[in-house]
């Protein structure tokens, strides 16, 4: 830009021609050669022009101008509007300089306007320019009261109106650029700008503050951008630190990828947002969004919309989306460390996990929340099916109604407060089917009570009651469990049994203890278990022995006293079989505990001794006839 001014200053010398030669010669064919001769005497081999014209009253027009700078600059035409009144102040006053048609492929030479010259306006038209990684084509520029304070300035300070067919910075092309600005050493203002980038029209205003730029009334339409990748682009890394605030911005009908979420036809409005602060540090402002869809991992959210209001106390949020063929509505307040929802409604969701990628949304770690509460929870007609990992399970027709629920308190998960009722039309786990199940529970100041759990089975039921004081360091608890005709075969992986087992179990269990930590539990477990197994079938295998034996077990008694568990020796009854089950362990040293099952099959003349603990099992056989 300073190079162009150099051309303007050189042209000013022609004013001397006006003074020396007078008005008469200006209208003759001798004007151009006379002016060329005088310029060569004053600035030899510096300024050349093919023609000069005088236009009434104070305008000079130079054509075919060449400045012998390094590199040389050629200009098709240059107009100067002179102001003779500046001579009264011993200054050369130039109302305007217009440079029309120049190719500045190697940038502009350094230039500082002499103090004796005052330029009111600089105008460029049809300029191509390249410098410092910036390439501009078809530039038109008008600067009122241009001011240079440094030879290295790309543009002089002043009121600027700029248009360009294209400006390329760090490989990014900005087309049809328009800028109207007041460019100052500080506190600059952009009254308006517009351009097309990636086929997206972008317009707005901006103001400069000591902290950086603030974007005002910015509108971006039809943008297709992967923001996760764009953050590593050199241009983003140059621009982002200089923009500290969004006064108002609208993103319309755009495709955007951000933080792993792919948004389709996104509309986003942001007000009063500080970019140098993270999402949770915003003290004021507003954000709203809606989209046709959003894709995260393997989950598609349909027509999501949300409104967020930022306050010093947190983010007030209200939103709705369709996901997994159902609806989710949420309203509440969020912070980086807590969630307090006034309402959460989930209806009609059908989540079916058949492939490993279906589980990805639930494989992410939960944030380290300090508190999580829901004032009103309403879940209607959910269906959840998991067939990726065994054991398979499903629940259908799931409904839940909760009030004043608190799930996390002081970073500890638990049912700390509230009332919750859950029902399900059907549920199954590893082939165990329950219909019309009911769970009712409540908690008051950390004392959780399961008032009713009733799960009807195909041939029986499961019923439980429990209490757990989460507010106490020792966390005392109580449990009562009764089952009738519970299939135990599908539950074998829970108990690490060294033999195959199929049976229906009738269980009566009462237990209590303290769950403050593992040692407390090991020292405090008390209770009793009565177990009967009906229609049992046991499968045992050794190197040379296989037993498949029907059996019955009546009234097996298990007692727990301060963590010491004892199985009263109890016979297993079966045709052609005599067997005895017994064992003991101490929860302080469970690795030393052992269960024993001695089996005698008279019809096969085989005796088997089976010992197992929580880690391994050992099966030994011998001839019953030689046994003592």
Image (tube, rainbow, N blue to C red):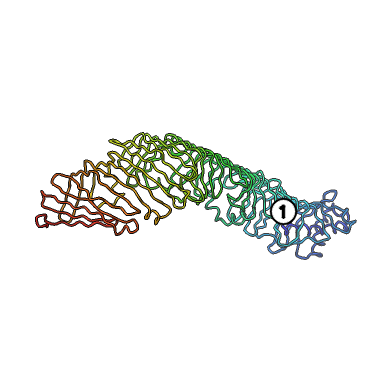
Q: Position of residue 478 (x, y in %)?
A: 39, 46
Residue 106 placement, left or right of 448: right
User: Please, which residue is most extreme toward the right here?
Assistant: 88
Helix, strand or loop under label 1 = strand
| Screen quadrant of the N terminus | bottom right
Rendered position, 372 above or below 628:
above
Residue 64 placement, left or right of 424: right
Point 39% across, 50% down: residue: 513
Rendered position, 342 above or below 571:
above
Q: Nearer the viewer, residue 478 or 242?
A: 478
Q: Position of residue 198 (x, y in %)?
A: 57, 47
Residue 79 visible, this angle: no
Q: Nearer the viewer, residue 132 or 486?
A: 486
| Screen quadrant of the C terminus | bottom left
Specify few, some or many for label 1: CA neighbours under 10 Å numbering under 14, 14-19, or 20 or more.
Answer: some
User: Please, which residue is most extreme toward the front here?
Assistant: 561
**Would you identify the image quadrant in which residue 532 lies?**
top left
Residue 184 visible, this angle: yes
Disc 1 designates what residue?
76
Residue 470 placement, left or right of 59: left
**Would you identify the image quadrant in which residue 305 lies?**
top right
Rendered position, 62 above or below 415:
below
Point 23% across, 54% down: residue: 596
């Amino acid at each position: 830009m300073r190079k162009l001014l150099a051309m303007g200053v050189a042209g000013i010398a022609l004013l001397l021609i006006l003074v020396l030669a007078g008005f008469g010669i200006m209208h003759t064919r001798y004007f151009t050669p006379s002016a060329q001769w005088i310029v060569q005497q004053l600035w030899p081999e510096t300024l050349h022009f093919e023609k000069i014209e005088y236009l009434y009253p104070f305008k000079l027009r130079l054509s075919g101008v060449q400045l012998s700078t390094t590199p040389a600059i050629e200009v098709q035409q240059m107009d100067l509007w002179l102001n003779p009144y500046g001579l009264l102040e011993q200054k050369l006053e130039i109302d305007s300089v217009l440079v029309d048609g120049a190719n500045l492929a190697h940038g502009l030479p350094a230039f500082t306007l002499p103090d004796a010259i005052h330029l009111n306006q600089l105008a460029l038209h049809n300029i191509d320019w390249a410098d410092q990684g910036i390439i501009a084509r078809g530039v038109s520029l008008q600067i009122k009261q241009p001011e240079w304070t440094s030879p290295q300035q790309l543009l002089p300070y002043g009121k600027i109106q700029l248009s360009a067919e294209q400006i390329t910075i760090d490989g990014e092309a900005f087309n049809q650029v328009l800028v109207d600005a007041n460019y100052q050493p500080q506190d600059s203002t952009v009254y308006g700008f517009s351009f097309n980038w990636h086929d997206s029209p972008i317009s707005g205003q901006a103001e400069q503050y000591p902290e950086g730029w603030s974007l005002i009334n910015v509108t971006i339409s039809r943008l297709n951008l992967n923001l996760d990748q764009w953050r590593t682009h050199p241009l983003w890394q140059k621009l982002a630190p200089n923009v500290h605030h969004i006064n108002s911005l609208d993103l319309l009908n755009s495709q955007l990828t951000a933080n792993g979420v792919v948004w389709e036809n996104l509309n986003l409005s942001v007000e009063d947002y500080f970019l140098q602060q993270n999402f949770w540090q915003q003290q004021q402002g507003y954000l709203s969004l809606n989209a046709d869809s959003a894709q995260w991992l393997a989950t598609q959210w349909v027509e999501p919309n949300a409104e967020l209001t930022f306050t010093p106390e947190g983010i007030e949020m209200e939103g709705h989306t369709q996901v997994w063929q159902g609806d989710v509505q949420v309203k509440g307040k969020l912070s980086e460390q807590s969630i307090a929802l006034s309402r959460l409604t989930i209806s009609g969701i059908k989540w079916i996990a058949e492939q490993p990628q279906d589980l990805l949304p639930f494989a992410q770690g939960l944030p380290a929340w300090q508190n999580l509460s829901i004032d009103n929870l309403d879940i209607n007609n959910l269906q959840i099916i998991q067939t990726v990992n065994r054991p398979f399970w499903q629940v259908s027709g799931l409904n839940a109604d909760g009030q004043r629920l608190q799930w996390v308190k002081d970073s500890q998960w638990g049912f700390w407060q509230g009332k919750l009722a859950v029902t399900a039309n059907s549920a199954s786990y590893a082939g165990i089917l329950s219909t019309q199940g009911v769970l009712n529970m409540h908690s008051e100041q950390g004392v959780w009570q399961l008032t009713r759990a009733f799960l009807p089975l195909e041939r029986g039921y499961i019923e439980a009651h429990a209490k757990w004081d989460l507010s106490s360091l020792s966390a005392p608890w109580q449990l009562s469990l009764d089952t009738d005709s519970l299939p135990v075969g599908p539950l074998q992986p829970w108990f690490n049994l060294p033999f195959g087992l199929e049976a229906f179990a009738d269980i009566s269990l009462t237990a209590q203890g303290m769950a403050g930590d593992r040692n407390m539990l090991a020292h405090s477990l008390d209770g009793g278990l009565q177990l009967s197994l009906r229609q049992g079938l046991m499968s045992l295998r050794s190197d040379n022995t296989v037993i498949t034996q029907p059996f019955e077990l009546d009234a097996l008694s298990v007692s727990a006293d301060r963590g010491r568990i004892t199985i009263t020796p109890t016979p297993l009854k079966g045709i052609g079989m005599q067997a005895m089950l017994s064992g003991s362990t101490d929860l302080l040293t469970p690795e030393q505990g052992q269960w024993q099952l001695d089996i005698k099959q008279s019809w096969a003349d085989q005796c088997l001794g089976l010992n197992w603990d929580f880690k391994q099992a050992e099966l030994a056989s011998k001839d019953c006839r030689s046994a003592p």
